[in-house]
Image (spheres, coloured by chain):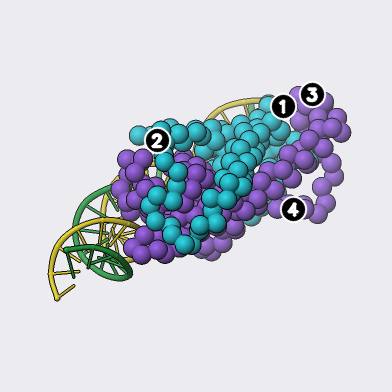
Chain colours: A purple, B cyan, C yellow, D green
Amino acid sequence: MTAAASRLDDMFIALADPTRRAIVARLARGDATVNELAAPFDMTLPGISKHLKVLERCGLITRTRSAQFRPCHLERAALDEVADWIAENQRIWSQRFDKLDQHLRGLQGMPGTAPPQHGEDIHE
Amino acid sequence: MTAAASRLDDMFIALADPTRRAIVARLARGDATVNELAAPFDMTLPGISKHLKVLERCGLITRTRSAQFRPCHLERAALDEVADWIAENQRIWSQRFDKLDQHLRGLQGMPGTAPPQHGEDIHE
DNA sequence: TGCTTATTTGACTTCTTGGTTAATTAACCG
DNA sequence: CGGTTAATTAACCAAGAAGTCAAATAAGCA
């Protein structure tokens, strides 16, 4: 099975690289060309080009064509999907803790600590 | 240069894998042993063990020892760092757009579209 | 037309990742 | 003690990621 990565996967992967996050940070200040984006980094142009492709694949940036330049543009809505995942999980986790189920922790982590799982609803 | 990944890197990397996100989702319902975590997946135990190590490295889970079991526990605070990064960036991006700097978009993406950058403050 | 600038593609290398099987460590149970 | 269960480590492999250099493409400019 090759190439089955979800959009969420791609988003997290894209953000996992510090160079890419720096590029994104730069783009937050306004559109920029590939050369401009490459300037601060000790990396060749093709290297940057690859990073941009990753950012493009997950929808974080788009590229238009203007003469021989290909200005990069940040898509502000793209972060929402990740933000939603995080928010949803923070909600769920807190809920769980509010139920005080966790004060047993450390006493016995044996099987059975968890509620009776039936459906395995991995809700992603 | 080996092993220079930041905690934020590790966090995004950990969340980039669907199996690991599923494990995390499962743990949100309560602590669980490695075998319990492995059950829903078509993967060998050592495979799961590796995933757990990744989750542990970034602080998303901790493991205690209870007899021959090593129950995994979700650290609810760990998500905060990522959440903060996301929130901060959403804020910045929106700010930028509120300034109406972007309605020029498409007219000319030429160098100079961005404000005078001096310090390259990559603020991460 | 031919030169220059901007960017991408291709081919290649190296390191990492995700997964496997087989063997090992740990701790319980009879 | 000896056997069973839980989990990890070790050794390995295939695929992917990150980076390089060299060549190709695209579009302005003289």
**Horizontal and vertical percent for residue B11?**
57, 38
Residues tagged 2 and 1 counted as in contact (Cβ below 8 A): no
Give me the C-alpha separation between circle 3 and circle 1. Answer: 8 Å
Residue A107: mark in rendering: 3
Give me the C-alpha separation between circle 2 and circle 1. Answer: 56 Å
Sort mark 3 into few (<14), some (14-19) or many (20+) by Cα contacts within 10 Å. few
Sort mark 1 into few (<14), some (14-19) or many (20+) by Cα contacts within 10 Å. some
**3 vs 4, front mark:** 4
Mark 3: which amino acid? Leu
Q: Chain of mark 3?
A: A
Residue B118: mark in rendering: 2
Residue assigned mark 1: B66
Give me the C-alpha separation between circle 3 and circle 4. Answer: 29 Å
**Horizontal and vertical percent for residue D19?**
33, 46
Sort mark 4 into few (<14), some (14-19) or many (20+) by Cα contacts within 10 Å. few
Q: Element at badge 2?
A: loop
